[in-house]
Amino acid sequence: MDENDLIDQLEELAERFGIQIRYEPIKQDEDLVRVVGGLCLLRGEYVLIIDSKVAMGDKIRTFAEALRHFDLDQIYIKPALRELLHKTS
């Protein structure tokens, strides 16, 4: 499975949990910790913000970190995707 397919599946999974996904450029200050995004609760809705400029691997890790806050055992997830989520969490 290539990274683009993986991102598509992660987006679909996140949407099943009602997570709004936003890809936006995150202004980085060179002297501070690098931020690639994260899960927020905004006005009662989950929003996953991901820096639009980061590498695919960073996007995948950000999705995995966000999704581990939800009960993944209660829904069907393709085995390859489930394995990836367990490895990255």
Image (tube, rainbow, N blue to C red):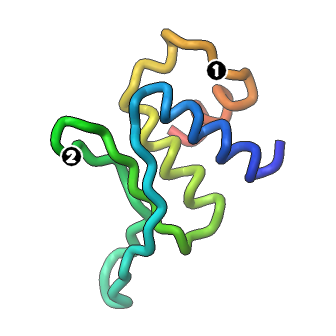
Helix, strand or loop at label 2? It is: strand
Where does the image place residue 9, in percent across and percent down from the top left?
66, 37
Where does the image place residue 6, in percent across and percent down from the top left?
71, 43
At 36% from the left and 31% from the top, the residue drawn is 69
Residue 35: quarter of image: bottom left
Q: Amino acid at mark 2?
A: Leu
Looking at the rendered image, the disc whose residue lies closer to the viewer, 2 or 1, is 2
Sequence-wise, the earlier of marks 2 and 1 is 2
Left or right: residue 11 versus residue 2 is left
As displayed, is residue 51 above or below residue 20?
below
Left or right: residue 77 versus residue 36 is right
Quadrant position of the N terminus in the picture? top right
Helix, strand or loop at label 1? It is: loop
Q: Amino acid at mark 1?
A: Ile
Q: Residue furthest right?
A: 1
Question: What is the spatial separation of the Cα atoms under label 2 and label 1, in whole angstroms?
Answer: 26 Å
Where does the image place residue 19, in percent across and percent down from the top left?
40, 37
As displayed, is residue 16 above or below residue 24?
above
Residue beneath label 2, please? 42
Q: Local crowd at mark 1 within 10 Å, few (<14), some, or many (≥20)?
A: some
At 45% from the left and 35% from the top, the residue drawn is 67
Residue 5: quarter of image: top right
As displayed, is residue 62 above or below residue 66?
below
Q: Residue furthest top?
A: 74
Left or right: residue 64 versus residue 37 is right
Q: Local crowd at mark 2 within 10 Å, few (<14), some, or many (≥20)?
A: few
Residue beneath label 1, please? 77
Left or right: residue 63 versus residue 32 is right
At 18% from the left and 36% from the top, the residue drawn is 44
